[in-house]
Image (tube, rainbow, N blue to C red):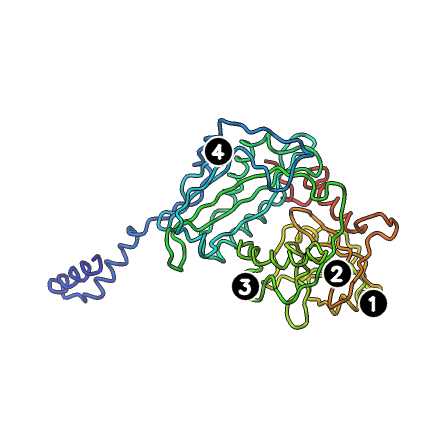
Amino acid sequence: MFVQRAMRQATKAQTILGASPSKYAAKVLSSSRLYSTPALAPLDASKLEINPSKNQKALQENSQLVFGKTFTDNMLTIEWEAGKGWGVPQIKEYGKLQLDPSAVVFHYAFECFEGMKAYKDKDGKTRLFRPDMNMKRFNRSAQRIALPSFEDEELTKLISEFLKVDDRWIPKGRGYSLYLRPTMIGTQESLGVGASNKAMIFVIASPVGPYFPSGFAAVNLLATSEKVRAWPGGTGDAKVGGNYAPCIKPQLDANKEGFQQNLWLFGPDHQVTEVGTMNCFVFWKNEKGEKELVTPELDGSILPGVTRDSILNLTRSWGEFKVSERRFTMSDLVKADKEGRIIEMFGAGTACIVCPIKKIHYDGHDIHVPLDPSDKTSQAGKLTKRINDSIMDIQYGDVEGPKGWSVVV
């Protein structure tokens, strides 16, 4: 209607002034754009509304905490709408989300999330570990599945306020923390396949204890090539819900055979990619005789883990051995095993920091990964334990880490 009106105005102008109607209409349309497209509202922490729960739930003893089973009194929510932008952030009582059955999250997997933790240091201060990396990855994941972007620092501020409201839920003691799950979903009520015109961020929190309550427990892996976790050009480098459900059946099959996790392989040459839901690290003597810590390179199919990046930065700063991000295969591991060059191997992620590996079953044979040769009862190698302790020292504020790693709320 506006275009037609502009053209009519242009025709009239041509009659009166002898001007080109197309040029005049273009000028009218161009100037109108300054007024017809309002700026979208950014995510703004200053607009936060806090209406906390009036019914405080009973806290559990640290010894009773089970990962992801208990949730705090409150939650953080922010809604988004195309053409408007981000709405008013709210901290309110933890409760069920009200969504239409046709919401696109249920039908087309418009969902991504983050995993991060809040820690209490010895002075009672609350700390976050590298939240800037979580926010950047959260944004990348959202954009990969056509969900809206947001202002990183503003969401970090909102999460900090959320932590202040539910402060009593952050357990004290080394190894204990409050697990945070920022999530974004598409909420448009439609069965059409397309970008969602509505979305929501919500953040929930769960108090958790040590991943290994009784100390490290090294795992056995089943090398899996028939089913794959990710592929080139897919979503392996994004933290989207659709990456996880398809991996459960292969893990259950591995469990039936006595293995805790899958070692995900890819391609005809069986490239090593990830361990279950963790990044994979091998510490060995390479074929040049150098001690080397190696992890698969970020080729688009590997999740850029915050713990992964922290391990690479820390070990490089030590300057004691070569640290590499590169492609390697099961043939490389088999050869290194036969030649006695494998020193340690572990998975890495937010939940566990590091998870020692002691055996891999591949092609009918077992690769036995050393742990700590100086202690036959140990369930982790010396480097694995050192990395775990070094990162925990920073997370709990016992050691001053690199700038921006441990952020006091």
The quarter of the picture where residue 304 lies is bottom right
Of label 2 and label 4, which has the lower sequence position? Answer: 4
Residue at the extreme bottom of the image, as rendered: 268
> Which SS class for mark 4?
strand
C-alpha gap between disc 2 and disc 4: 45 Å
- Judging by the rendered image, the residue that carries numbered circle 3 is 234
Q: Closer to the N terminus: mark 3 or mark 1?
A: 3
Within-10-Å neighbours for mark 2: few <14, some 14–19, many 20+: many
Local crowd at mark 3 within 10 Å, few (<14), some, or many (≥20)?
A: few
Q: Would residue 156 appear left or right of 212 to someone viewing this image?
A: left
Specify the amino acid type for callout 3: Gly
Q: Quadrant of residue 347?
A: bottom right
Q: Amino acid at mark 2?
A: Ile
Give the quadrant of the C terminus: top right
The x, y position of residue 369, in whole percent, is: 80, 58
Residue 166, image x and y in percent? 55, 32
Residue under pointer 2: 360
